[in-house]
Image (cartoon, rainbow, N blue to C red):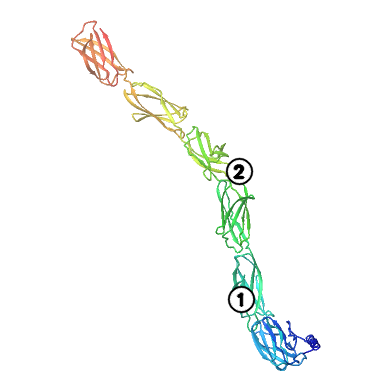
Amino acid sequence: MISKKYILLLLLLILLITSITTVNSTNITNNTQLKNNHEINNTQHDTTQINTKTMKNTNKEYVNIITGKLVTQVNKTSNITLQITSQYKRPVNTGQVTYTINNNTKITNNVKKGITILQYKFNKTQPYNITAIYHDNTDNYYDGIQQFQVNIIDPRPTINMIITPTNTTTQTTTTITINYQDTYKNHIENGTTQIKIDKKELNTQIEHGQTILKYQFNKTGNHIIQVTYHGNTQYKTSTITKTIQVTKQTTKTIITKVNPVKDTTTTLHAIIKDQYGNKINNGTATYYINGVKETTKTVKNGEVKYNKTFDTARLRNLTIRYNGDNNHQASVDKITLHIQKINTTTKITRTNPVKDTTTTLHAIIIDYNGKLVSSGTVTCYINGKKTITKNITNGKIQYNTQFTKAQPTNLTIRYNGNTQYNPSVNKITLYIQKINTTTTLKQIKPVKGNNITLNMTIKDANNKKVSNGTVTIYIHGKKVATKTVKNGQVQCPIIFPTAGQKNLTIRYNGDTQYKPSIITMSLTIQKATTKITNTKITKKNNKTIINAIINDNHGKQVTLNTAITIKVNNKIVISNKYVVNGKINMVINRIYPRNTSYLIKTLENSQYKSTTVSIKT
């Protein structure tokens, strides 16, 4: 049995050895502690566990595992050298070391002259965790364990990657440029690169030291772009991460200039464009008139339209504000609208005025929409001379006037306008008609052969005497006389040589101011009266001879054959005997005594009335 004193001495020796052991490692070193000659406590790191067996050699030593350089290159077979020494710092020449790499790969190497070498090719630039366990099949050394970390580096130089731009706008095809440079700012001409934008992968090539790609961001905010250069034989893989700030596009609202007219529907129109001049196809725009919200319209094909009717002619401030959307900023345009007075039309009702006759001139004033204008004044001009100014009533005007001359006359009617209506004017030529006339004939009773005066009066339609012109007289259509009118009167002496019905036409011939007038009538020319004169009764040779002369009312012998009847003592002795040229020479074949009564009677004919004469002897 080992004495307690010896055991205590052994423990003190173990503590001394542990305190002087130097481990040049970047990670924690765990050494196995021997409790006694027969047992070794279990030591575990990750999944590796060391078990010690009861040793027979009581002079058995602990070992020190000393690491060397713990940095090596990637993709290159590297030698990791470990020194194995006893607790007295003597090289250990026996045993083996088993390496566990990242809890996976195991490699075992022998220890020679206190050295063991791990040959391994590290293919990733990352720290590798290695556990080295020393084991000796002899009873000279206890098992030992060392954990350490090997840093794998890439000796190739890194490159600089410059990403532009750092900001852009939504729905914009953005040209993203990545320039690749070495530390001396030389362009990297080859290699492959992987680009991630918001985790979306885009594989591209490097050409002429840069990568150019087109990309459109559809949301505002910060977007992450990560560029990984995969490296080559000269340059190692590098990654850069940048933030691109995406904001809404600026916009421009452009109001189309218009000239609205009072009471007329006007389309208020605007074009909405983005910062690149493209029409925007969504969102809304709000209309303001004099600062007061009017309406909100949806943008379609980059345009907004609103139909508005202005009821007064004055200045109005129009503001159209595009309200923006998820991808576009708001924008505003303002203009001043000059609301025009409404155009008007003056319409004159064409009329045919007559000289010296009251004529009513009519006109209406309508606006652009055909509505009657309700206010304002109208001025009338005749042959350029102002005659009257009148207020219109319900869009109409009536003006009574007379024209003193029958001639073409220029009539101008001008609507003078007001604050809401534009003036308008109309001109027409009035053809003033000659005034009508009437011709009257004073009643007459003409008698064959009598001298008679035709008294005629010429008046106009206003019953005023016509002061000039001529009158022509026709009998049976044949002109017999022309007389001048004086103060509305015409006198014409005339003789009708025969009795009977006569067609008399009297025509006032008119002039530049008066229309002609005509009367036609049938006159009955009375038969002339006759008288038997120069009567003489002669008795001779048993015959009674009666002589006489038939004269007309002018004492002239009648010219027509006239039938006569003679009565003696009231007894017809001669019946319907014709005499020529008014000479009576009748013979009765007997002689009558004294105090015999004779009656001579002419019979009426077409020209002469009947007459009688009584003779007593």
Horizontal side of 86 relative to 585 (left or right) equals right
Disc 1 packing (10 Å; few <14; some 14–19; many ≥20): some
Disc 2 packing (10 Å; few <14; some 14–19; many ≥20): few
Residue 151, numbered circle:
none
Residue furthest toward the top? 594
Q: Is 489 located above or below residue 259 in the figure?
A: above
Could you say where residue 5 lies in the image, as x and y percent from the top left?
A: 81, 88
The amino acid type of the residue labelled 1 equals Gln
The quadrant in which residue 105 appears is bottom right
Horizontal side of 571 relative to 111 (left or right) equals left
Residue 419, numbered circle:
2
Between 572 and 57, the one nearer to me in the picture: 57
C-alpha distance separating marks 2 and 1: 73 Å
Horizontal side of 80 relative to 367 (left or right) equals right
Could you say where residue 500 lies in the image, as x and y percent from the top left?
A: 31, 23
Between 467 and 583, the one nearer to me in the picture: 467
Q: Which residue is mark 1?
A: 194
All told, the count of numbered labels is: 2
Mark 1 secondary-structure assignment: strand
Residue 153 in view, yes or no = no
Between 97 and 383, the one nearer to me in the picture: 97
The quadrant in which residue 198 appears is bottom right
Q: Residue at x 63, y 58 (%)?
A: 331
- Circles 2 and 1: CB atoms closer than 8 Å: no
The amino acid type of the residue labelled 2 equals Thr
Could you say where residue 407 lies in the image, as x and y percent from the top left?
A: 48, 37
